[in-house]
Amino acid sequence: MSNSLGSIKTVVIATGTGALLTWAALTLTADDSLQHDQIASLENRIEELELSLARKDEALARALSRPSNTAARTNPNAQSMTASNTPSTTNTTIAAATQSDDMSKEPVPDSQQILRELSTKSDRDSRSFSAKVNDLLATNPSPENVAIVSQGIIDKAATPDLLPDHELEVLYQSQTDADVKRIAAQVLSMRGDNRLIDKQISGAQAGLRSENAAERQKVLVELAKTRYAGAASVITPLLQDADTGVKLDALLALRSTGNQSHIPLIEGLTHSSDPAVSWLANDVINSLQNLSDKARTRVNSADAAAELPVMPE
């Protein structure tokens, strides 16, 4: 079989290359002014031909390695017979193997198309946005789909006629993904209703009381993503945590959620014996002193968008 493959490749390369070189010689003699461009084009074409043949060789090898019928499995001469196929049979096998490879490739999902389908009602699909989201994530709750859904929610933040408040509540209650729940709550806060985001923060408090420092840190990271001052009140007690890592994450979370009113709670840490804690405390104070005591009492669109999962390309 390997001899057959080698001969096919040699013949085709020789034929293709010879034809291209003949064409090049005639053309270059006729017009020297195009010489360099045509040589470059010729070299590129030869490389393309070699790459194409290499791919077809691989496809042919895979096709010939599979038993095609009962005779091939029982006849001791089957392998030699296959290797001596006529050129027409070999070409058919190459085409079939190439087509099989193309068909086996899964189509790359179009994130923008999924987003449009979620956002558009039609006679063919009259489901609500929340119903489409729930169906999509029930079928495939991948990070890519979560990012698409999150973007769809943010896109409709300013248009409650397209995504009513009650649908945001449906999403919050029906979804288990932390990002989808948070973003639904943030959009409702942007519209002046903090019920869902307050509920989310209240639910996080149990994790802040965990004996596991890593668990406390994980909850602080999630609270920081809310960009909501209501989270600061449950974060500030952890500024006195015995674990330095937790203390640092509490400072970072306050930088994302707090405002000017929280500065007095941080000032004591600027004199910490731990240089990392004292430096970060000063940095957080510098950030918060530019925010009034009313800042972040409602989530704004820029803060919500800043915490979106990354959309697939």
Image: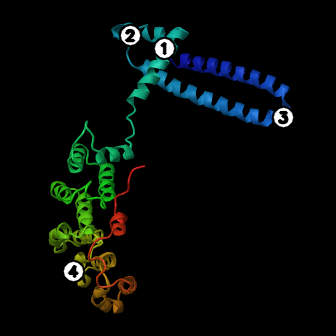
Residue 238 marker: none
**Which is closer to the viewer, label 1 or label 3?**
3
Q: Is residue 264 above or below residue 304?
A: below
Type of amino acid under label 4: Ser
Residue 92 marker: 1
Residue 266, given in percent of the width and then of the height, sits at: 30, 87
Residue 233 marker: 4
Q: Earlier in the sequence, mark 1 or mark 2?
A: 2
Q: Earlier in the sequence, mark 1 or mark 3?
A: 3
In the rendered structure, the answer to whether residue 123 lies left or right of residue 115 reads left
Q: Earlier in the sequence, mark 4 or mark 1?
A: 1
Report how far apart the C-alphas of labels 1 and 3 lie in the structure: 42 Å
Residue 72 marker: 2
Type of amino acid under label 3: Ser
| Disc 3 element | helix
Q: Earlier in the sequence, mark 3 or mark 4?
A: 3
